[in-house]
Amino acid sequence: MAKLNEGDVIEGIFSIAIAQLFAYGEINKSKINSLRTKIDPAIFSSGKFTTTVREYSDGKPEDKIKVVLTVRLKPASVSGAFGPNYELLYKSSKVIGNIDQKINQLVSQMNTNYATRIETIKNNFLKNNQSDTVNISVIADGIAGESSGGTIKGDIDVRVLINGIESMNDKLSFSLKSGSKTLSNLSPFNGMMDVVSRFGVSLKDKRKYQEALGRTLVSARTSEEKRMKVKLIEELYSEIKKELKSKSGTPRFSNAAYQLFKDSAFGSDLAEIVDINKTKIKEMNIETINELQKNGEKITCIISGNNLKFLVKNKELFQMRFKKRAEEISANDYAIKELKFYIEAGPAAYIK
């Protein structure tokens, strides 16, 4: 069995939970696990799993409602967490146990923003004083989102058709996390140059970075080239940190910081973030961030170790982090194992 990816597994389980909220008004652990046994990950190699969760009538006058769930996940990263044999692996897999605790959180925590949103959507058609035919589609397709290059953040989409017409006001998109604060995972050069552009950072020698990191050292092969690549990225990052600190708190800086955060967190589809761990559920949406910006809350930044933290109301909204794993193996052998540039959420990003 390949190594499970908890985030991918939770994406599938959360889609089942969302479908249950539309179908039954609650999340039931037995129903979640029953449906898990019917989802064979092998199907994801060439297609999708689709099932009707419930067809029912409700409201006065009566509405006819159908809830359909469609799931497509990365087969290698969810094998063992779905399918008829997943229960047999339960005792031998710590990850499966972690997932079980996260399901318990979904079941027990109903005072969430997403549950409230779903209840509002249901009331929109149940209490509109007319009889409607309502088709609700819950679609989990993490594979499609990855092909967007990071601009689309949503893992799960909800579409509501009322009498054959899609209700655009009732569309939902969710980005699932499983105890991760990462919003964007970028190549250092592209990510840092995007920051330079957004904030109007003045570099001492921008052309040097563009020529070397953007062209000649993109595929650094020799040890000398690899050393030079790491050195230049560190120089670029150092310049950016100092420049941003000097601009901290100005209106342009705050506006650029808000926009960077919103693009990194919510993407072009404005997906709501739901972070499910073993002890709690945390949520994040663009409305909360827009409210901070509308109220004129400025963003400042501080250098903390090798990271750059962005603060709003003296609390961390997000941070930039450069991760380097490189080493001298011998006098003539320098190895780059990992170079990453992260945008990561801070405590102030989440809905209270």
Image (spheres, helix red, strand yellow):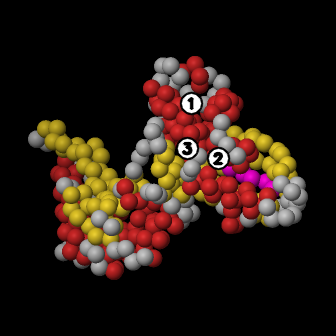
Q: Amino acid at mark 3?
A: Gln
The answer to whether residue 268 is visible is yes
Q: Tell me the element at label 1.
A: loop
Q: Which residue is mark 1?
A: 81
Q: Are marks 1 and 2 in contact (CB under 8 Å)?
A: no
Give coordinates of residue 227: x percent, y percent.
18, 52
Extent of the magenta region: 134-138
Q: Are marks 3 and 2 in contact (CB under 8 Å)?
A: no
Q: Nearer the viewer, mark 1 or mark 3?
A: 3
Q: Are marks 1 and 3 in contact (CB under 8 Å)?
A: no
The answer to which quarter of the image holds residue 234 is bottom left
Most frequent secondary structure within the magenta stretch: strand
Q: Which residue is mark 3?
A: 109
Front residue of this view, candidates 12 and 99: 99
Between marks 1 and 3, how big is the CA–CA gap?
A: 22 Å
Q: Earlier in the sequence, mark 1 or mark 2?
A: 2
Q: Tell me the element at label 3.
A: loop
Vertical position of residue 14 compared to residue 287: above or below: above
Give coordinates of residue 310: x percent, y percent.
31, 64
Front residue of this view, candidates 148 and 17: 17
Give coordinates of residue 311: x percent, y percent.
31, 65
Q: Tell me the element at label 2.
A: helix
Q: Which mark is residue 18?
A: 2
Q: Amino acid at mark 1?
A: Ala
Compared across the picture, whether 249 is left or right of 348 comes to left
Q: Nearer the viewer, mark 3 or mark 2?
A: 3
Between marks 1 and 2, how big is the CA–CA gap?
A: 18 Å
